[in-house]
Image (cartoon, helix red, strand yellow):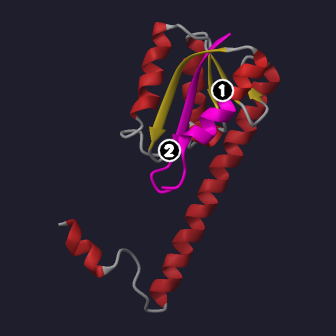
């Protein structure tokens, strides 16, 4: 099977290297005898679709063919919400492309893989929403205690 690999590291995590993900993806392909047709790599937040140029290019390349599935290390490398997950997977399926998350039991070429994908995507979105709620609550508490919330005053002046 010919596949496309996708790796993404967040711009916030400066010490991350996409080669860590690519190494595991390449090894997975080697074990299964899959051919790597292309590698796409982004360094951007998952929520920042504007800066995820390689992800956009991968989705554009879906129409061109040349490979049969997209491989990522984990779901969160590609998606940030259940809706985005389902919309993208419907797009891939419409173009007869599979999706595989190597470290999770997800392979959309199987019924079980599709079910597990839905469950894991919902859990991932739930965890992200809980984290957002905790951060908001912590900021509200800090503000109520009279602490400064946000960028340091000097940092605002430097941005202008």
* In this picture, residue 160 sits left or right of residue 1: left
Residue 143, above or below 160: below
- The structure residue drawn at horizontal position 42% and vertical position 28%, both measured from the top left corner, is 56
Disc 1/disc 2 C-alpha distance (Å): 22 Å
128 in the magenta segment: no
Tally the numbered discs. Answer: 2
Residue 71, above or below 152: above
Q: Quadrant of the N terminus?
A: top right
- The structure residue drawn at horizontal position 35% and vertical position 74%, both measured from the top left corner, is 151
Magenta span of residues: 1-25
**Secondary structure found at label 1:** helix
Q: Residue 22 or 78: which is nearer the viewer?
A: 22
Q: Residue furthest left?
A: 160
Q: Which residue is mark 1?
A: 26
Measuring from the top left, give residue 19's x and y in whole percent.
57, 38
- The structure residue drawn at horizontal position 67% and vertical position 39%, both measured from the top left corner, is 74
Measuring from the top left, give residue 125's x and y in whole percent.
63, 48
**Secondary structure found at label 2:** loop
Q: Which mark is nearer the camera, 1 or 2?
A: 1
* In this picture, residue 18 sits left or right of residue 60: right
State the image quarter where residue 87 is shown: top right
Residue 128, above or below 96: below
Q: Which residue is mark 2?
A: 46
Sequence-wise first label, 1 or 2: 1
Measuring from the top left, give residue 64's x and y in whole percent.
46, 8
Q: Residue 40 or 143: which is nearer the viewer?
A: 40
Residue 6, above or below 49: above
Measuring from the top left, give residue 52's x and y in whole percent.
42, 37
Q: Residue furthest bottom?
A: 146
Q: Quadrant of the C terminus?
A: bottom left
State the image quarter where residue 69 is shown: top right
The label number, if any, that marks residue 89 in the structure image: none
């Amino acid at each position: 099977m010919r596949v496309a690999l996708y790796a993404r590291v967040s711009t916030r995590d400066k010490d991350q290297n996409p080669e860590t993900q690519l190494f595991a993806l390449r090894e997975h392909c080697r074990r299964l005898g899959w051919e790597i047709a292309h590698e796409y790599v982004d360094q951007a937040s998952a929520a920042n679709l504007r800066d995820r140029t390689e992800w956009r290019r991968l989705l554009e390349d879906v129409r061109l063919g040349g490979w049969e599935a997209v491989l990522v290390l984990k779901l969160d490398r590609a998606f940030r919400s259940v809706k985005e997950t389902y919309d993208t997977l419907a797009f891939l399926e419409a173009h007869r492309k599979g999706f595989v998350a190597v470290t999770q039991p997800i392979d959309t070429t199987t019924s079980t893989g599709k079910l597990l994908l839905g469950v894991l995507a919902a859990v991932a979105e739930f965890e992200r929403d809980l984290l957002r709620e905790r951060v908001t609550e912590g900021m509200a508490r800090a503000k109520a205690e009279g602490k400064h919330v946000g960028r340091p005053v000097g940092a605002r002046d430097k941005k202008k």
